[in-house]
Image (cartoon, rainbow, N blue to C red):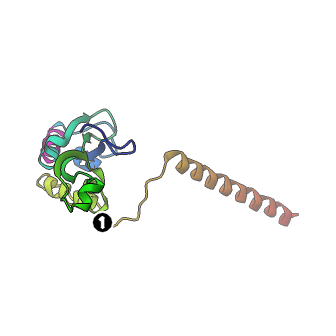
C-alpha cells in the first residue's frame, strides 16, 4: 500500500480468550493460575482460527499468560485488492472514452470489521473453538463496556449517596427520639 488516508484504520487488534472456568476448572477464582494442557489446546486452536481466517493479513499475535486469564492479542491489517477506474479528462468524457481500470491495494477495515462482520466473527470463533467444549457467550447482551474511571466514579458516587442517606436517617432518628 503506497499511501492511505490519514484517518484510515491501518490495523485492528483482536483479543481472543475463554472463561476462567475453562483454564482452571477446579478454581476459577485463582487469578493467574491455569491448566497448561488446556492453555496449549486453546492457543493452538485460536491461532489456527486466526491463520485460517486472516491468512497474510495476520501481522502478529502475542500470548499473554501473566494476567488473570490467558488470552491472545492479534494484529490484523486488512489490505485488499480493489479494481479502480482512472479519472477521465474532459476530452475523454466528450469522446465517450471508457475509463481505464487498474488494480490497487488498499485498506478496508470498514467492510471487514463492520457491524455485520463482527457479528459473524462472534459466531465463527466459538464454532471453531467448540471442539474444546467452549460455547458462544450470551447473544444480544445489553452489557456495555464502561471506562474504568467512570465505573469507579459512579460506584463512589453511589456509596456517598448511601452514606449521606444513612446520616439523614440517623439524624431523623435522633430528632424523633427527643
27 vs 170, left or right, is left
- Residue range corresponding to the magenta coloring: 37-49
Q: Which residue is mark 1?
A: 139
Q: Answer left or right for 149 relative to 121.
A: right
In the figure, residue 95 lies in which quadrant? bottom left
Quadrant of res 111: bottom left
Q: Where residue 10 sits in the image (x, y, percent)?
A: 31, 42
Secondary element at tag 1: loop
Quarter of the image holding residue 92?
A: bottom left
What residue is shown at x 88% (from left), y 63% (from top)?
178
Q: Residue at x 31, y 36 (%)?
A: 32
Of 77 and 34, which appears nearest the observer?
77
Seen from the viewer's position, the closer of residues 130 and 35 is 130
Q: Specify the quadrant that holds the N terminus.
A: top left
Badge 1, how many Cα within 10 Å: few under 14, some, many 20+? few
Residue 107 against residue 170 in the figure, above or below:
above
Residue 144 vs residue 168, the one in the foreground: 144
Magenta span includes 45: yes
- Residue 104 lies, with reference to residue 130, above or below; the image says above
Question: Residue 62: image x %, image y %?
Answer: 24, 34
Residue sitting at x 14%, y 48%:
49
Instruction: Locate residue 59 relative to residue 169 in the image: left or right.
Output: left
Amino acid at each position: 500500500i503506497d499511501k492511505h488516508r490519514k484517518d484510515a484504520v491501518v490495523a485492528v487488534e483482536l483479543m481472543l480468550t475463554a472463561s476462567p472456568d475453562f483454564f482452571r476448572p477446579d478454581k476459577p477464582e485463582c487469578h493467574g493460575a491455569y491448566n497448561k494442557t488446556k492453555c496449549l489446546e486453546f492457543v493452538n486452536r485460536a491461532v489456527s482460527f486466526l491463520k485460517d481466517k486472516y491468512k497474510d493479513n495476520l501481522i502478529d499475535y502475542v500470548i499473554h499468560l501473566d494476567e488473570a486469564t490467558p488470552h491472545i492479542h492479534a494484529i490484523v491489517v486488512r489490505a485488499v485488492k480493489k479494481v479502480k477506474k482512472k479519472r477521465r479528462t474532459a476530452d475523454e468524457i466528450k469522446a465517450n472514452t471508457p475509463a481505464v481500470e487498474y488494480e490497487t491495494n488498499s485498506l478496508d477495515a470498514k467492510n471487514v470489521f463492520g457491524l455485520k462482520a463482527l457479528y459473524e466473527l462472534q459466531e465463527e470463533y466459538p464454532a471453531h473453538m467448540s471442539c474444546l467444549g467452549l460455547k458462544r457467550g450470551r447473544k444480544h447482551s445489553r452489557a456495555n463496556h464502561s471506562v474504568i474511571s467512570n465505573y469507579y466514579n459512579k460506584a463512589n458516587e453511589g456509596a456517598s449517596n448511601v452514606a449521606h442517606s444513612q446520616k439523614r436517617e440517623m439524624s431523623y432518628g435522633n430528632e424523633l427520639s427527643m
